[in-house]
Amino acid sequence: MKNKLVIIFLIILGSIFYILTIRGALGTSKTPNELTKLSSLGQPFESSHERASYALTSSFLLDHSLVLSKAWADFGSPDVGYANGKFYSFFPPGVSFSIIPLYLLGQRFGFIQLGAFFTIALFAIGVLIFLYLICRNIFKLSQMYSILAAIVFGFSTTSWSYAITVYQHLPTTFFLISSFYLVWKYKNSERSGWPWAVLVWFMYGISIFFDYPNALLLLPIMFYFLFSSFDFKKSADKLSIKFRVTILITFIVFIALAALHLYYNQSLYGSWKKIGQSSNFQRYRIGDYEQLIQKRADFQAAPTVTTSDQIFKEDLIINGGFTLLFGPDKGIFLFSPILLLGLFGIFEIRKKLNMEYGVLIAILLVNLLIYASFGDPWGGWAYGPRYLIPSMAVLSILAVIWLAQNSRIIIRRVIFFLLFAYSAAIALLGVITTNVVPPKIEAIPLHLPYYNFLLNYHLLRNGVTSNFIYTTYLSNHFSLLTYFLIIYSLLLLVILFILINLPRREYDN
Amino acid sequence: MIINFSLSSKFFERLNKLFDWLVSTKGILIISIIAAISASLYFYIHGYTVAYGDAESHLNIAKRVVQSLTPGLAQLGGIWLPLPHILMLPFVTSNFLWRSGLAGSIVSGAAFIISSVYLYKLVYLLTQNKIAAFIGAIVFISNPNVLYLQSTPMTELSLIVFFILSSYYFVKYIQDDSKLISLLLSAFFGFCAALSRYDGWGLVVAEAGILTLYYFPYRKVPLRLSQIKEYWDKKTYNKLEGVLIMFCTLAFFAIIAWLMWGYLILGDPLYFTHSQFSAKSQQQSWLARGELPAYHHIFQSVLYYIVTAMSNAGIVIFGIALVAFVIYLFDRNQKHRFLIAMLLLVPFVFNVATLYMGQSVIFIPHVTPVGFDWRLFNVRYGVMMIPMVAFLVGFIFSKIKLTTRWLIVGLMIVQIGLFGVGYSKIISFEDGVSGLSSAISKSPDAQFWIAQHYDQGLVLEDDFARTISIVRTKIPMQNIIYIGNKPYWEESLIAPEKYATWIVMQRDDALWRAIYDVPAIQGRLYSHFQKVYTSPEILIFKRVANK
């Protein structure tokens, strides 16, 4: 099977599962009032994260303004900032702008919300493709193993829950994984490699439009990019160094994107240094409107949104690290234990550590370091550790590398299958029901009985969902649980087929 | 577009020479001297040398030995071990060096420089790799928490230097037990460590224990009673006996001497453990408030100390050291690796044990509950682990390929960057500046008042309550009456007017309870003194001129 056919297979597979699980409904609802009806638990706009990003898109397309009207601010609240009498989305504009093409397509054919949401699924499919290419071309795994890495990430981690709604995590992962692959292409190109270099800078620059911490998250790749521009050769009497100036010349792409970003800040917030989460923005809550208007001057004097106090503090790392890795409400290894195999994968590669493996491990560490040091490692009310989605992609590669070792093959495959089955069930639970799951720290004082996937199981049993396919076509025929089991069985069949057809010995090519 | 350039072999020869010099003992000596002087100057200029409350107490103890109402060695007291104060004696005779804290900086700085050099030698001894030894020493030298503490009169660096010296000679001995001089030197520096901080006691006990294991008189484990005699190795036992007696006589003499000192001077050999000024007594109030989380809780004790060590070393460096530790333990090429690991783990075991027993307390924001009164206290104890961390980073450097070495160097730079951008706080410095250990964050208005208004005469104050900072006023040490000035102190509590011109008291301190709370004495106070300063917590009285 050629790579192109595999890529087509992954596109089809990804599209099937993402369409089977996407939330929402057909229609052309686009006013805040209409959309607010879709903001209860399990609905496509259940989270303010989705609403605020979508509000910016709608405001831009319908009101031709990046400043939100009060109606859109109410819709996006509380992820909306207020300053100088204006409302802004808290989030950088990348997600909101990226969903515009499919929003417009949906407007034409009657599926605005579904179209907009499917944009993120396209990023997710992109991640699947690049994971395949990385395994296949960089780590020289066979096709089946490479496909497996893509499927592990796509459908046995909680990344699935964020692939069918408007969050920034899948685009972030796409930029990260694709940049890694592009740098490798650049490194191995025989000439200057400028097309790859342009793309790397483009990915880095554009990623910051989607999430500000991406500037840090992609740093290991940018260092990889820099080191790949040097080539050392030692002879008897001298050391020759080659340096590809391409990296410097193509830097202009990043400069242009950065300038565009600063211009956006200048024109929207009045200063190129301000961002949507700057400390001079007051978080807007619906009931606060009158108070905000009356006390406008006070808000500038007494800012309440101080992100600098909440991020990047070592003090927080113990709590944050435990929460993200092992926490009963968000722990990555509780929600997706198959990724534990990724840690064993690191152990397997310890003796053949090269720059590419080093970069993967560095991405894991930087991702964990940034978000474990964040004031809100839980990611608010969310399903699983959403901030670690980029790490899930990396761990998927490493898990498959563990599987591909030439010893105890049967045991490895059995363990892999069992962990996949558990992880996929948890992943599917979230995607079928809701992403709005309270962290333990909030659930206990609020006397909420569930703070992890048990809530989703409860909702599944009670048929709470806004799954497009199920609610539109199937809810009259069978229960949500049956629908869950159909998708789950389909997924297990795919994985069983791949596991059975894996080559007996890996690394033979 | 590609740029080509090449470097000739001559260039590399020159570079090699420079590099060889840099990674030698001389190079480390020069680097550590520059680092010590620069850091000390920086913290002195910014006024942080005597930021810790304990820093001033150490200076004052040394000062009272040479200049006070009742000078003499008895002023060394019975709580803190005496060697760091004795080392400061030549310097505190200068009022400038005493008041500025530089008397302590000189001692700590010298300890830092010697520590750096001997850490280099220790890593070299164990790896036979100069670059690894250099990297190990650089981890120590570049640590901002160490750099801060070496600029102050705190006693951590005094312990660290003797810990490293004793460990270096101890390792040298167990690598070649024909070199008895190494064992003697180890015992001597163990003696010094045991007179510097109580952690030193743990060191000498551990060294004695390791010697016992090293010369364990059984080469096979006896499984039956009859084998106890059968496997007994008389020759090894004799050697153990001789070596232990030699080592312990010198090393343990410090402990015995200190117990005798307590008995002779203070009437109780264990005065340091249970007097009202002991650390344990001070922990009782935390315990009463339910804010002693590690007390009788082994998991919390381990967690608190690991996090404290991590925060002092820097999270990235600590992570490398953890990986290195696992590799070290599994590296069969490392002779006596378990014995050496035990030695290097002494600060860890000691601090966990004292936390568990309630003899000490650490508050660190990473794990201390938000509801606690204080969340930053005593975090400098974690600095004791930095020599071990530095050794481990050096060790792993010696075991890896060139490309991974660059990764380690890169991570070391990242760690410095994390300290630089404030992600990793320089936590021992923060504690001195704004934690519960800080004196400068709690300087009362009364201190500024008396600094301006003091003219002459004796000042009666409860030194333990740290009502005012003596070094920050113009009061000469010989004009202070404190609890250690017999009979001035005792007589002043009955007749305050007998010696003192000034009385400084703080609510509920020893003077307040003995003078202000006793109506008869209070009457006497007011008949001879005038209250010249009042605040809700502090009162200052001045003798009325004509009485």
Image (cartoon, coloured by chain):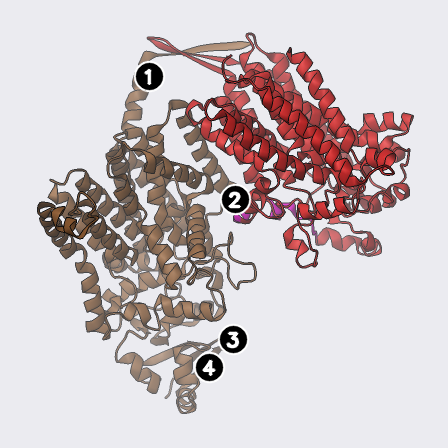
Chain colours: A red, B brown
Report the residue marked by disc 1: B12
Answer yes or no: do the residues labelled 2 and 1 have beta carbons within 8 Å? no
Give the label on residue B422, or none. Answer: 2
Residue A88, x across and y down, in percent: 78, 41
Give the label on residue B531, or none. Answer: 4
- Dots 2 and 1 on the same chain: yes
Above-or-below relation of B443 to A99:
below
Amino acid carrying mark 1 in the image: Phe
Q: CA distance from mark 4 to mark 3?
A: 11 Å
- Dots 4 and 3 on the same chain: yes
Answer yes or no: do the residues labelled 3 and 2 have beta carbons within 8 Å? no
Residue toward you, A200 or B357: B357
| Subunit bearing disc 1 | B
Which mark is in front, 4 or 2?
2
Above-or-below relation of B72 to A232:
below
Above-or-below relation of B94 to A189:
below
Sooner in the amino-acid sequence: mark 4 or mark 2:
2
Answer yes or no: do the residues labelled 4 and 2 have beta carbons within 8 Å? no
| Subunit bearing disc 4 | B
| Subunit bearing disc 2 | B
Report the residue marked by disc 3: B535
Category of crowding for the residue at label 1, using alpha-carbon neighbours closer than 10 angstroms: few (below 14), some (14–19), many (at least 20): some
Residue B11, x across and y down, in percent: 34, 15
Element marked by disc 4: strand
Sooner in the amino-acid sequence: mark 3 or mark 2:
2
Q: CA distance from mark 4 to mark 1?
A: 76 Å
- Which segment did they paint magenta? A303-318
Amino acid carrying mark 4 in the image: Lys
Category of crowding for the residue at label 2, using alpha-carbon neighbours closer than 10 angstroms: few (below 14), some (14–19), many (at least 20): few
Q: Residue at x 73, y 37 (%)?
A: A431
Sooner in the amino-acid sequence: mark 2 or mark 1:
1
Q: CA distance from mark 1 to mark 3?
A: 69 Å
